[in-house]
Amino acid sequence: MIRTAVPGDVPRLLEIYAYYVVHTAVTFDCEVPSEESFLRRMAQTLAHYPYLVLEEGGVIQGYAYAGPFVGRAAYAHSCEVTIYLDHLSRHRGFGRMLYNALEEALASPGIRNLYACIGDPVTEDEYLTRDSERFHARMGYVKVGTFHRCGFKFGRYYNMIWMEKLLGQQDRPEAAQGGEDPEA
């Protein structure tokens, strides 16, 4: 079952997230946020974007949400997406289900561009693999940029990549303004 997150979900969501903070470089957070801080983040997201949880047998197995991309008005049709699954629930299709539901929820407010900011190892190690990049590629995202050695965690540097997915029909400025399409 996929539903909108509620404040009572915070302890379980934080439990899922804490694993990635403490044991991986999937997130560049180096300390687990407090429940109050996590709840504030969730409330800020829910004010404008979807924040979804996936339950199986009444237990939350993962969550995904969207947020502003850059935060300026011209980017209103773009957003950044984030997903975390219980580390014991990976490879069960939950990520695909959550992202599909998130995309559906984002289509109605007219979001067209999705961006994922992903930790990327210089060399895969015990803290970070390229699994997230591979997952996003399977979901239709393409890599559009790399920031080299910008994150430092566990005594080593990691890259950060941006991946993009374009949803639906992309309007062309010429068509929107009534001009001719030079490629037609």
Image (cartoon, rainbow, N blue to C red):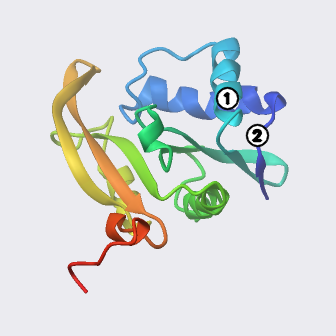
Q: Nearer the viewer, residue 81 or 154?
A: 81
> Residue 95, how many percent across, how many down?
56, 57
Disc 2 on helix, strand or loop?
A: loop
Say few, some or many: other residues with alpha carbon within 10 Å of mark 1 (under 14 / 14 to 19 / 20 or more).
Answer: some
> Which numbered disc, 2 or 1, marks the residue that appears first in the sequence?
2
- Disc on res. 5: 2
The answer to which of 96 and 179 lies nearer the viewer is 179
In the picture, measured across the screen, residue 97 lies left or right of residue 122, that is right
Q: Residues within 10 Å of mark 2 (few under 14, many from 20)?
A: many
Which amino acid does the dot numbered 2 rest on? Ala
Inspect the image, locate mark 1, and give the three-letter code of the amino acid beneath it.
Met
**Looking at the rendering, which quadrant does residue 60 occupy?**
top right
- Tell me whether the residue at label 2 lies in contact with that at label 1, contact meaning CB atoms closer than 8 angstroms: yes
Relative image position of residue 43 (x, y in whole percent): 71, 26
Residue drawn at the location 64% of the way across and 46% of the way down: 62
> Where the N terminus falls, by quadrant?
bottom right
Q: Measuring from the top left, give residue 61's x and y in whole percent.
A: 68, 48
Residue 3 falls left or right of residue 158:
right
Real-space CA distance between mark 2 and mark 1, rounded to the nearest whole angstrom: 8 Å
Q: Residue furthest bottom?
A: 184
Label number found at residue 135: none
The quadrant where residue 14 appears: top right
Read off the residue under disc 1: 42
x 26%, y 43%: residue: 161
Asked if 52 appears above or below 20 in the picture, the reply is: below
Does residue 50 appear left or right of residue 147 in this picture?
right
Residue 3 in picture, x, y percent from top left? 78, 51
